[in-house]
Amino acid sequence: MHPIRKKRLTIVLFLVAGLAIAVGLTTYALRQNINLFYDPSEIADGKAPVDVRIRAGGMVEEGSVVRDPESLKVEFRVTDYSASVAMEYVGILPDLFAEGQGVVAMGRLNAEGRFVADQVLAKHDETYMPPEVAEALERASKGRHQAADVEKAAESTAY
Amino acid sequence: MYPELGQLALIIALLLAVLLSVVPLAGALTGRDSLQAFARPLSTGMFVFTGLAFAVLTHAFMVDDFSVAYVANNSNSMLPWYYKFSAVWGGHEGSLLLWILMLAGWTLAVAVFSRKLPSTMVSQVLSVMGMICVGFFLFIIVTSNPFDRLLPNIPADGSDLNPLLQDIGLILHPPMLYMGYVGFSVAFAFAIAALINGKLDAAWARWSRPWTTVAWAFLTLGIALGSWWAYYELGWGGWWFWDPVENASLLPWLSGTALMHSLAVTEKRGVFKSWTVLLAIVTFSLSLLGAFLVRSGVLTSVHSFANDPERGTFLLALLGITVVASLTLYAFRAPVVHVRSRYGSLSREIFLLLNNVLLVAATMLVAIGTLYPLVLDYLNLGKLSIGEPFFNATFSPMAVATGLLLGAGIFSRWKRTDGGWLARKLLWPLAVSVLVTTAVMLVYGGFVPWAFAGVFTAVWVTMATAWDLWDKSASKMGRWYGLKRQSRSYYGMVFGHLGLAMVIAGATVVSNYGIERDVRMVPGGSAEVGDYTVVFNYIGDRRGPNFTAEYGEFDVFLDGKHIANLHPEKRHYPVGMSVMTEAAIDAGLFRDVFIAIGERISDEAWAIRLQYKPLVRWLWLGSLVMAIGGFLAISDKRYRIRVRSEAKDVASTGEADASGSKPAEANA
């Protein structure tokens, strides 16, 4: 083969090999490491998979935070004001974790429907709302309004 | 009154930028020196007026002028003066102004330090810089004016700088990072000018190299400072989170690293020209992509600013125009370039090509992991996140492969390297690396495959670099003479590679052998982390300039010997109603002991995080060494010699083959 062509072929082969490795690693790693987000209503409806690492979030329900005085275990409920899910976490919570604040947690749903978090995120700003949580709340409140509308409609037709 | 002057200065700077982007370019294309002569004065003027605007904003912060909305949102009268100063770039508008100031500064630097370049080249480069400036001046004036006023209702006091940003890290991190981001615009401008000229030769590569290298060195420092800041200021001892905004800075760093290496080949051997130009375009586009990601509101992270969609659209348009225009120019012009040099399939050219393939593949991996969730979200296909495991699983093998290749590549020769000779050359470094790595494994106790791979890579790069230096510095006049005879750019390479080895070693060891414990502690109690015993003495209160804090008193013992007294804090900032964890760290070259206070669990018990972080400092020291390498390389005297304008000096100046011990061709 002509040396220049041979060289070009080597270059192309290198590029293709590099690309193939990159694509292979990427798809493999993507399949393993994508974490889907579920809101409390979806979890309550049983739409979220059990024992798969997922993200879940909402507002920390007022009065729901229970701390074990003997360990670092914390239990709390996260709500979108339509449904709520019980979460437990062992470790140090972020500075701005508080009742009535938005949080996003990473973890797995166990067979009893409790969310066992291995990571809890709250942002470093009192006005911050995680976008997933904001959307979940919006969806949930739309759902409630629709339900309310249906009820109203039902009431009005009763007459 | 002053803020309006700042605004006016920005508008004048915009007008100068418009002139700069048109006049010298027209002069270069029509061959009129009178027009080209405007390039330098226009660049200077643009910098002066941008500097004026920056000074006005700084003044507004210093005198607490809360009638300026940006000051009211990002400062407070109780803030110490140095944080008032760094608050200038603590929010979107001001940091954008800093960005533009640096862009104007780089333009001025090109104007000042390129007196030996042909005037048409300088005119074109400065015009391209001018065009970039026009884009950013329009952006700041139209969408993000830092001088907007809150009139007539002037707030009594400002709403304070985010406490996270009240730190030395913020004073240093953004300026360094922006120097890097923006600095790649120079390499881009050189590439575009060369495409317009149709002159992609070794001289062009030589002119681009120092600019690329210095931008890269700043970016390296900026990223390292960010990582260091996250480590101690975010409170929980992580040093890299694969946060999309961190990735946004890593993307141009990776492709910029590829660009540096590819420029070396283009300068020395006159090959890979089209590829190098493409990399210069890609690197700058990735800088713009970073700006878009951080400032558009598509991301939420510690870094992202309060946003509105108009800004995102504007930046996306700017990115789109840059990419489309430069790639169109590339499509028309790049094929003109013909390659004449030849090289074998085992040569330094091929090693550097592989380096580029790996670095570009790594860039793509990081880009996919960062952008994929955004694209899916935008298309309403669901919300998902791609976290650390993805990047660790894909990036680490790439880093290891790059390091292994680097060790072998150091010994390779331009044009052709004899395989048997190379294998013999690598034998001893290989053997020593295996021994040293095994020893390291024994010290840290426990064989972990990934840790072995990482440490081996680091040791291998170090051994190969040192071996090569030893070979090259052999001289009849003695070792010292031989060492002194090596060029600064060679030492730049040595430092760059040793720094990389340090970063790899640090990252590997701290990820695999670090210990992290969250424990419940009561005053008077103690806990173990690794070989260290931490005693919790008491909790106290103290008052800072603009915060109150609870602090813990801790003593750290190793084998019964007292080694440190640490005071981690939990700070409350009343103005922004925010809470901050201030970790306390006993830092050392070989390990950090890290203590942070969590929340109070019961009346007397606290949640405490204890960490043992071996070699964590090497991450930032290594980055510093890399950056020093970059600065050493650009101080090489050959960049100050008048450059012959024709491409005939390709290959005749190769310092590597000239100073090599035995030309490999002799063996072939």
Image (cartoon, coloured by chain):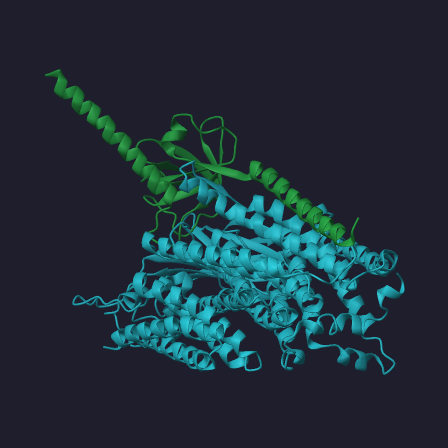
Toward the front, the furthest residue is B30
Name the foreground residue: B166 vs B139: B139
For the C terminus of chain B, the image quarter is: bottom right
Residue placed most toward the observer, B616 or A4:
A4
Compare residues B587 and B662 and report the one nearer the observer.
B662
User: Which lettered chain is shown in green?
Assistant: A
Decide if residue B160 is in sight here: no
Residue B257 percent across, percent down from the top left:
61, 61
Give the mark count: 0
- Left or right: where does residue B308 sit relative to residue B107? left
Q: Quadrant of the rendered structure where residue B626 is? A: bottom right
Please report the residue visible at 69 percent of the width from the left and 56 percent of the height from the top: B353
Q: Indicate whether A137 appears above or below B556.
A: above
Q: Which quarter of the rendering shows the N terminus of chain B?
A: bottom left
Is B499 displayed left or right of B220 in the figure? right
Question: Which residue is found at the position 58% from the left and 82% from the top?
Answer: B116
Where is residue B390 drawn, in percent x and y? Answer: 57, 44
Q: Colour of chain B?
A: cyan
| Rendering coords of residue B647 (x, y %) | 67, 72
